[in-house]
Image (cartoon, rainbow, N blue to C red):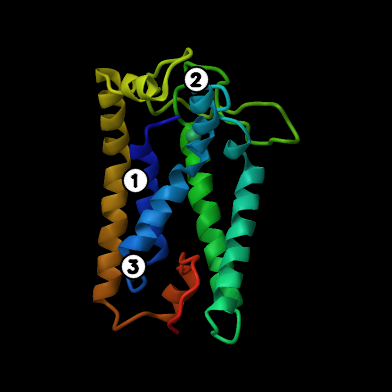
Amino acid sequence: MPLPVAHSLASGIIYSSADADGSLFTWKRLLLAIFIANAPDLDFLPGLLMGEPNRFHHGPTHSLAMVVIVAGIAAGVAALGARWSMRGRIEARAVAGTALMVGALWLSHILLDGFTDDLLGPFGVPLLWPFSDRYFLFYPWFPHVARYSGSSEPVAFLLSLLNSHNAWAAAVEILTLAPVLALSIWWRRRSRAGTQGPTAASCAAMPPLDLSPSDSD
Ligand SMILES: [Zn+2]
């Protein structure tokens, strides 16, 4: 797994690319996108509580099946949110867009993990769970994250992440993904400068990513 640095940069790239003219940008949506792109690593939590942080890591949350599941949940929540907001109708395009966006963010996490060196088993990601037990490590482009692998208290585990190797790993992640993010932001601003307000194309490409009911139309 790479550090949250890489996953957060990836979420920015996906968000910028989807919101081509920036007409739908909000910090709340961006923070939600960053959370979703990092969410598969919540599988650390049960192990942390048990004193074995790596025990459940790289489990089912790192599979394509989970991408489909979270995208389906996002679609359901978006549809319910539209109904509760009293808009009078559920916009299928917005619901599908939300599902695609959430699925893309989750998938980006799995792909980045698959391109990261891994020194702690299991090596790679269980892409085809539950149909196969095989783990996939595509190419070790990003350095591994050095962390305590034995039993430890949550605080001790988190402190083990603070080391010079992980600083180098963060630098590689930034040097690889920050230029792509800068390019996507430049493209977005260039598109915004060339348009007057949101275009139909941008609205179709960018889902609202606002899963909570709204009282305004
Ligand atoms: Zn992960």
Q: For the residues carrying marks 2 and 3, which lies nearer the camera in this image?
A: 2
Amino acid carrying label 1: it is Leu
Question: Does 40 sit above or below residue 101?
Answer: above
Give 213 or 20, whichever is nearer the viewer: 213
Q: Quadrant of residue 201?
A: bottom left
Q: Earlier in the sequence, mark 2 or mark 3?
A: 3
Residue 175 image position (x, y, % from top left): 26, 36
Q: CA distance from mark 2 to mark 3?
A: 40 Å
The CB of the residue at mark 1 lies under 8 Å from ligand 1: no
Amino acid carrying label 2: it is Gly
Q: Residues within 10 Å of mark 2 (few under 14, many from 20)?
A: some
Residue 72 image position (x, y, % from top left): 64, 58
Q: Secondary structure at mark 3?
A: loop
Q: In percent of the image, x 55 and y 53: which residue is there?
A: 103
Residue marked by disc 2: 51
Q: Residues within 10 Å of mark 1 (few under 14, many from 20)?
A: many
Residue marked by disc 1: 9
Question: Is residue 114 at least partly visible in the picture?
Answer: no
Q: Residues within 10 Å of mark 3 (few under 14, many from 20)?
A: some
Give 16 or 179, whichever is nearer the viewer: 16
Q: CA distance from mark 1 to mark 2?
A: 30 Å
Q: Which quarter of the rendered picture does the C terminus lie within?
A: bottom left
Residue 207 image position (x, y, % from top left): 48, 68
Q: Which quarter of the rendered picture does the N terminus lie within?
A: top left
Q: Earlier in the sequence, mark 1 or mark 2?
A: 1
Question: Is residue 166 at least partly visible in the picture?
Answer: yes
Q: Which mark is residue 25?
A: 3
